[in-house]
Amino acid sequence: MPKRSFWPGIAVVPLLLLGGAAPAVHYPERTVLLLVASWCAPCRVELAHIDEIARAAAPYDVRVLLVDDSKAGRRMVAALSPARRWLPDPAVAAPARAALLSRTPGLPYSVAIGPKGAICADRRGGLDAARTHALVARCRAP
């Protein structure tokens, strides 16, 4: 049974369910992943500037992971093209959200995922073009 979370609308799923391992999370390679929620006002500002953020992230893609599966959350990302949304397999979605949210005290939060699918940089707080460029540059650093 999922545990209650301090994140509204999110159930944190135990990583081991009935003795079985949770599915492995495969993050999209060369991607900046923005974690957003309907109740996060700064997240809405980020989404309003997603094209500017995407230009600054190039050659990395920019995708959004909705962390609250609510009607308001789905409305918030409805205008985004499918290429801008990260919709992992439902079996992996809850563990992926839990793993990413465990890295930050709040939203907005973003991670850069390198060419091997591993998180290579993260940023607490909203992104703009300059912050996005710096985030991606940290992934390219030796």
Image (cartoon, rainbow, N blue to C red):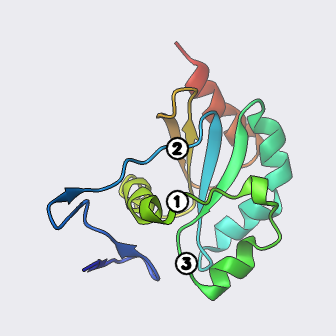
Residue 89: assigned label: 1
Label whose residue precedes the other's in the sequence (3 or 2): 2
List the residue tagged with mark 2.
27
- Residue at point 83% right, 70% down? 79
**70 sits to left or right of 54:** left
- Residue at point 58% right, 26% down? 115
Badge 2: residue crowd in 10 Å (few <14, some 14–19, many ≥20): some
List the residue tagged with mark 3.
69
Image location (x, y in percent) of residue 140: 60, 20
Q: Nearer the viewer, mark 2 or mark 1?
A: 1
Q: Nearer the viewer, mark 3 or mark 1?
A: 1
Secondary element at tag 1: loop
- Asked if one can make out residue 31 in the rendered structure from this viewpoint, the answer is yes
The CA span between labels 2 and 1 is 11 Å
Seen from the viewer's position, the closer of residues 35 and 123 is 35
Badge 1: residue crowd in 10 Å (few <14, some 14–19, many ≥20): few
Q: Amino acid type of disc 2? A: Tyr
Residue at the bottom extreme, as displayed? 71
- Residue at point 47% right, 62% down? 93
Badges 3 and 2: C-beta atoms under 8 Å apart?
A: no
Q: Amino acid type of disc 3? A: Asp
Image location (x, y in percent) of residue 54: 79, 44
Secondary element at tag 2: loop
Seen from the viewer's position, the closer of residues 113 and 2 is 2
